[in-house]
Structures are given as structure tokens and as C-alpha cells.
Image (cartoon, rainbow, N blue to C red):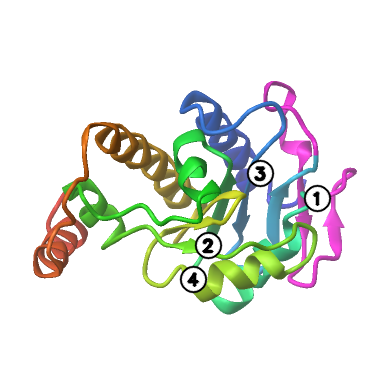
Amino acid sequence: MLLSTLRELLVELHQELRRNNLVSWTSGNISARDPETGLVAIKASGIRYEAMTAEHMVVVDMDGRLVEGNYKPSSDVYSHLYIYRHRPDVGGIVHTHSRYATAFAALGRPIPCVLTAIADEFGGAIPCAGFALIGDEAIGKAVVESIGNSPAVLLKQHGVFAIGKDATAAVKAAVMTEDVAATVWLALQIGQPEEIPEEYVRKLHQRYTTVYGQ
């Protein structure tokens, strides 16, 4: 099987989406770009997570041509490929309709940087792109135009796209997006949280990305 290790990893990462309550039924998808061949493995369209196997991760080239697999790729495949073509630093992409983050998206509102966790992980507010239809490159264009230096972006009236150096990093960004979205939503029920000043956001993000961890 072509890209077998990558495809097995994608199966496990899709289960992480389930474990973190980021997806329902067959919604959402993850893709990964193989750094050696430039080929992309992506979830097949309409596959339920509990039935998912490596065979449900199809392999396409950067033009969307099927290289290996017996299923149709995700309906978001052309937007994934658009992002990969325009962001050579990206090796993994996640799309979800996670509840709290998508509530902000429904209103076309960014998630403001009112928590140190947002400053750490995202380097500022999580932006919200405009509305785009599913099925071609339109969503990918909206992501590239709006995401900036953040690892995640909301899509108005749609959901979340998260990116990373690899698929695991992209899944982490998707998990963190929903986590902070839920906390900010709860805070908004109590009052209006203050945004963290930009100078502190920069310091927090730099510490998190250069000092934190092993």
C-alpha cells in the first residue's frame, strides 16, 4: 500500500477527532502531505469514523488525480490541495465543525485573544474568513487569505480549518481551537472579557514556541 505508514497515522488521528468531540457521524477530515513524494493522503468522502481503516485514506497528487485508493476523496480535497500549494510549510490539514468554534463561525466572529492559552498557541485572535462554498478551491483560498500566522481559522457559517507542519500538529491546533472557543463562550455568558495587550501576546507566544516543553 502506498504511503502505508502515513495512512495508518491518519486513521489514528481521525479517532483523536472523535475522542475530543470535534466531529459527528462522517463530518470533518484530515489530510497529510508526504514530504518525500509530495503526494497527499486524505480521508475518503462519507466514511464513518468507527469503520475507518487505512484503505479509507486515499492518495492523490497535487492536482487532485487519484494515485491509489478505491474511494472518492473528501469533498474538501481541492481546498486542501490549494492550501498545500500556497503554503509549503504546511504538512497537515484538519477540517472540523466542532461546536463552540463553529458557533463563532456562525456569527462570522473571530475568537478574541482573551486567554493566555490563545496567545500561546495562536499568537493572537483566531481569525474568521468569509463564506465560501464547498467542492472546489474556494475554501482553500479563503483559508490562505485569512489565516495569517495562526495555525487555525474559522470559516463563516461553516467550521474550522487547522494547519500544521504535519498532521499531528494540525490535529493539536484543531483540539486547542475548540478548547479555547468553549472557554471564551462561557466567559461571554458572564460578561465581556478583555483582550490581552499585543505586547504581552507577543511575549507569551514567543515563550511558548521557543522555551516551553522539551
Q: Nearest the camera: 136 or 82?
A: 136
- Outermost right residue: 70
Q: Are marks 1 and 3 in contact (CB under 8 Å)?
A: no
Label 1 or label 2, whichever comes before in sequence order: 1
In the image, the segment drawn in magenta is 46-72
Disc 3 to disc 2, C-alpha distance: 14 Å
Height in image: 85 above or below 166? below
If the image is split into quadrants, where does the N terminus sit?
top right
Image mark for residue 73 = 1
Q: Amino acid at mark 4?
A: Ser
Residue 128: x and y in percent read: 47, 60
Quarter of the view holding residue 38: bottom right
In front: mark 4 or mark 2?
Answer: 4
Label 3 or label 4, whichever comes before in sequence order: 3
Residue at image x 49%, y 71%? 146
Mark 3 residue element:
helix
Q: Return the residue at label 4.
A: 146
Disc 1 to disc 2, C-alpha distance: 18 Å
Q: Nearest the camera: 192 or 25?
A: 192
Q: Is residue 137 magenta?
A: no
Q: Is residue 64 magenta?
A: yes
Image mark for residue 91 = 2
Neighbourhood count class around disc 4 (C-alpha, 10 Å): few under 14, some 14–19, many 20 upward: some
Q: Nearest the camera: 93 or 106?
A: 106
Q: Amino acid at mark 3?
A: Arg
Residue at image x 54%, y 72%? 144
Disc 1 to disc 3, C-alpha distance: 13 Å
Residue 116: x and y in percent read: 17, 49
Label 1 or label 3, whichever comes before in sequence order: 3
Neighbourhood count class around disc 2 (C-alpha, 10 Å): few under 14, some 14–19, many 20 upward: many
Q: Return the residue at label 3.
A: 7
Q: Are marks 3 and 4 in contact (CB under 8 Å)?
A: no
